[in-house]
Image: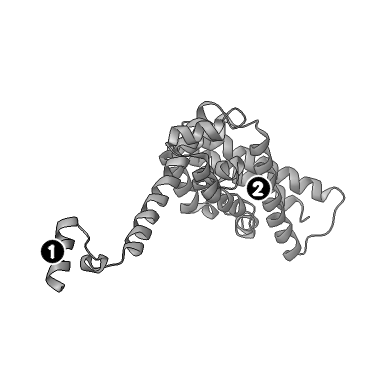
Amino acid sequence: SLGAGLSDNLTHGNWPSSFFGGTGAAMTRERDERASAGTRENLIRAALREFATRGYDESSVREICAAAGVTTGALYFFFKNKENLFREAISPVMEPLEDLIRSVGSDRVSKLVIEGRAPEEGLPARARRFLELCEERRDVIDVLKKNRTSAVAEKMRGEHIAALSETIRSFLRTSGAPEMAGGDLVVKWLANIALRSILVVVEQEESPEEALKHLRIVSEFISAGVLSLRR
């Protein structure tokens, strides 16, 4: 009977999931989503510690997983491999850095030099925000410092240099700059100098004012180099 069934449910705890306002599957899915977000963040935090202490090459997936308190299967659920984890871990700084180095070689900064105006006018709040971010994320900066010579860091620098080189080439094309012998080599050299100089600045423990002054110097140097290719 209905009464007997209800009594049995009360006695044995067999409550229908709809009684609690949702299905068991939906509640489980919501719980799993929260756990997944937490697991990914734990892996990134553990990876940052390992990469900063041991370096990328000496860090292992197993050690990172052990530090995060998860299985290797959990890591591969979120990341393709150790390199993908490394890239994701340092992305809070590297993605804004890419925006910054593109602005250093942009037509806007170079045009300011043409007009005889200070290059820092083209580096405005973006550079300051980037420096503030680096100060907040010293954990990422420590990883960059520790892994300067690793193959994966060199690979990433090459990608950023290629992107900045294309930004400079684009400006030269749109400004009608004549082709010159060795011009592409100079473009790559300027891009290399820009990226490595910015990394050196952010790795130093300077005051924001000192760091911004050094970024302005980098900007002026790169802008002057780009403009020399227009003549």
Badge 1: how crowded within 10 Å, few (<14), some, or many (20+)? few
Q: Where in the figure is residue 191, as x and y percent of width and height?
A: 69, 46
Q: Where in the figure is residue 108, as x and y percent of width and height?
A: 60, 59
Q: Is residue 104 above or below residue 43?
A: below
Question: In the image, what residue type sits under mark 2?
Answer: His
Q: In the rendered view of the protein, which quadrant contains the N terminus?
A: bottom left
- Which residue extends farthest front? 1
Instruction: Give the Cα distance between marks 1 and 2.
Output: 68 Å
Q: Could you tell me which residue is drawn at 71 percent across and 44 percent down?
A: 190
Q: Could you tell me which residue is drawn at 42 percent across and 36 percent down?
A: 69
Q: In the rendered view of the protein, which quadrant contains the C terminus?
A: bottom right
Question: In the image, what residue type sits under mark 1?
Answer: Ser
- Residues at discs 1 and 2 in contact (Cβ within 8 Å): no
Find disc 1 in the rendering and name its residue.
7
Q: Where in the figure is residue 225, as x and y percent of width and height?
A: 71, 47
- Which residue extends farthest bottom? 2
Could you say which is closer to the camera, residue 145 or residue 215? 145
